Image (tube, grey):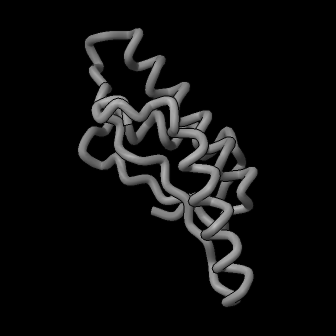
């Protein structure tokens, strides 16, 4: 969202999407998945960016948990270090992990 100048709308967009997905899942008796989205700012050589990505994942997992999702996939497979950050947040949130 930062790349397209809409970073200030990230929380509203995510929470709205979670609310709509929860409504559909409840109405149809289906599961609801969350997503932590891709992080384009990650750079393992810059500790401040590693921290920023970790913190952003933490916030998005919090939103997802508050939205009562059924499961949390991680799509950060293009970078093993981001997968580790995602896995850390999944386990910290006590979510079930599917590999």
Residue plotted at (39% across, 41% down): 83
Q: Is residue 96 above or below residue 29?
A: above
- Residue 76 pos. (x, y %): 35, 46
Side (left or right) of 53 relative to 2? right
Q: Quadrant of the N terminus?
A: top left
Count the marks. 0
1 to the left or right of 57 = left
Q: Viewer-proximal residue, 44 or 58?
A: 58
Place residue 21 in its image quadrant: bottom right
Please tell me which residue lies in front, 53 or 17: 17
Question: Residue 70: x and y, percent?
Answer: 66, 68
- Seen from this angle, which residue lies furthest bottom? 28
Residue at x-position 67% and y-position 38%: 92
Q: Position of residue 90 (x, y in %)?
A: 59, 46
Give the residue displayed 31% in from the left and 10% down from the top.
46
Residue 99 lies in quadrant: bottom left
Q: Residue at x 55, y 25 (%)?
A: 55
Residue 23, image x, y percentages: 70, 74
């Amino acid at each position: 969202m930062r790349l397209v100048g809409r970073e200030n709308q990230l929380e509203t967009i995510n929470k709205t999407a979670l609310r709509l997905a929860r409504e559909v899942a409840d109405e149809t008796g289906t599961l609801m998945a969350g997503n932590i989205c891709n992080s384009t700012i990650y750079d393992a050589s810059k500790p401040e960016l590693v921290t920023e990505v970790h913190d952003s994942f933490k916030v998005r997992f919090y939103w997802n948990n508050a939205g009562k999702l059924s499961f949390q996939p991680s799509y950060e497979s293009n970078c093993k270090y981001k997968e580790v950050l995602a896995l850390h947040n999944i386990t910290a949130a006590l979510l079930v992990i599917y590999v």
